Amino acid sequence: MGVEICVEGLTKSFGHQVIWQDVSLTLPAGEVSVMLGPSGTGKSVFLKTLVGLLKPERGSITIQGRDITKLREHDLYEVRKLFGVLFQDGALFGSMNLYDNIAFPLREHTRKSESEIRRIVLEKMDMVGLIGAEEKLPGEISGGMRKRAGLARALVLDPEIILFDEPDSGLDPVRVAYLNQLIVDLNAQIDATFLIVTHDIASARQVPDNIGLLFRRELVMFGPREELLTSDEPVVRQFLNGRMQGPIGMAEEKDAAQVEQELAALGDGGKDTQSPGSQAMTPRLLPGPGIPRPPRWEAIARREAALHQKAVAGA
Ligand SMILES: Nc1ncnc2c1ncn2[C@@H]1O[C@H](COP(=O)(O)OP(=O)(O)OP(=O)(O)O)[C@@H](O)[C@H]1O
Ligand SMILES: [Mg+2]
């Protein structure tokens, strides 16, 4: 039924470089959350810290009542079985074919027979459209195929917590649409807790329950999708609209006067053109035919409808 992850006051540095500080958020059990942020703000570092590959200087990460930042390697190994992780670079073993890469976690962490492993591996390869490529080495296939092999590998252990670092980068738009549907369907079926790092704003708008934004070494916001989509926070608006005007610059920092000037020049004060006040909020992506919607969806739909009513009335 998915597992909650509670992060409190987390700070991570490399030497003198603080990556982010005092990050607190809860990834609710069984929900899908997306983490956004400009390149280099530490999204990948955040995922690696959640699985215990990097040690934070301060703060805690509580999973099933245990602070994993304090665990010894042996206990951490156990906790890691809860996770399915797709790293940004795919992290496939270059000398193993795709079949063996995807079978690896099953051989490493379970006592399943080779015939059972075969059934699971082929099922996951089918799910991501890789049937027929079992014998290929990672170096012989396209970047998008490597990404999909990484996805299949992240799913073989039926994880309770799924972390995807830019699962959609390097995929064509049609495959991104399939991937988003796969995430929503998977979540409805297996109820795992998802955290997805993406730069794809269209996906971020329609897939998750919650959205977070990292910027300037801080978690600027983390909360329900509809809150972020209707937020007045300039950084959030700029990011969700993918535009140049706003606090985020090419080299990160802009001074306040410049930001004000830019937002004024937009005429609408930088209003989110897709917020409920101006048009209907981006609809949520629904599970495919025959897949029941998770129970929490009714409450979320009511919340979103109320917010929409309020915004339309106030517009
Ligand atoms: N092992 C490491 N040692 C030292 N510095 C690191 C290490 N890993 C990451 N960094 C630094 O941490 C910062 C954040 O990197 P990270 O890869 O998390 O960014 P990101 O938000 O994922 O960016 P992108 O969107 O481009 O993937 C960068 O400045 C990077 O150089
Ligand atoms: Mg990254």
Image (cartoon, rainbow, N blue to C red):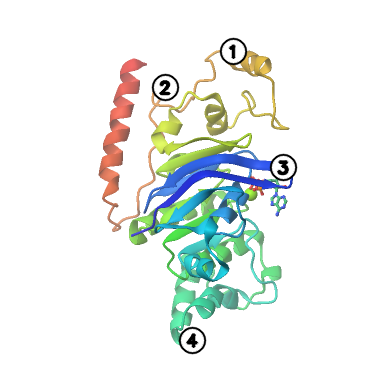
User: SS at mark 4?
Assistant: helix
- Work out which quarter of the rendered image holds the N terminus and state it: bottom left
Q: Where residue 179 sits: x, y (%)?
A: 49, 55
Other residues around mark 3 within 10 Å, as few (<14) / some (14–19) / many (≥20):
few
Which numbered disc flags the more N-terminal residue, 1 or 3? 3
| Residue for point 67% across, 41% down | 18
Q: Gap between marks 2 and 4, in whole Å?
A: 56 Å
Which numbered disc flags the more N-terminal residue, 1 or 2? 1
Amino acid type of the residue tagged 1 in the rendering:
Ala
- Mark 2 vs mark 4, foreground winner is 4
Which numbered disc flags the more N-terminal residue, 4 or 3? 3
Amino acid type of the residue tagged 2 in the rendering:
Ser
Q: Which dot marks residue 114?
A: 4
Let me know if residue 158 appears in the view: yes
Q: Where residue 312 sits: x, y (%)?
A: 33, 21
- Mark 1 vs mark 3, foreground winner is 3
Q: Where residue 97 sits: x, y (%)?
A: 63, 76
Q: Where residue 245 sits: x, y (%)?
A: 63, 23
Which numbered disc flags the more N-terminal residue, 4 or 1? 4
Q: Which dot marks residue 264?
A: 1
- Work out which quarter of the rendered image holds the C terminus and state it: top left
- Mark 1 vs mark 2, foreground winner is 1
Q: Which dot marks residue 17?
A: 3
Q: Gap between marks 3 and 2, in whole Å?
A: 41 Å
User: SS at mark 3?
Assistant: strand
Other residues around mark 2 within 10 Å, as few (<14) / some (14–19) / many (≥20):
few
Residue at image mark 2: 278
Amino acid type of the residue tagged 4 in the rendering:
Glu
**Quick one: 120 or 76, which is closer to the camera?**
76
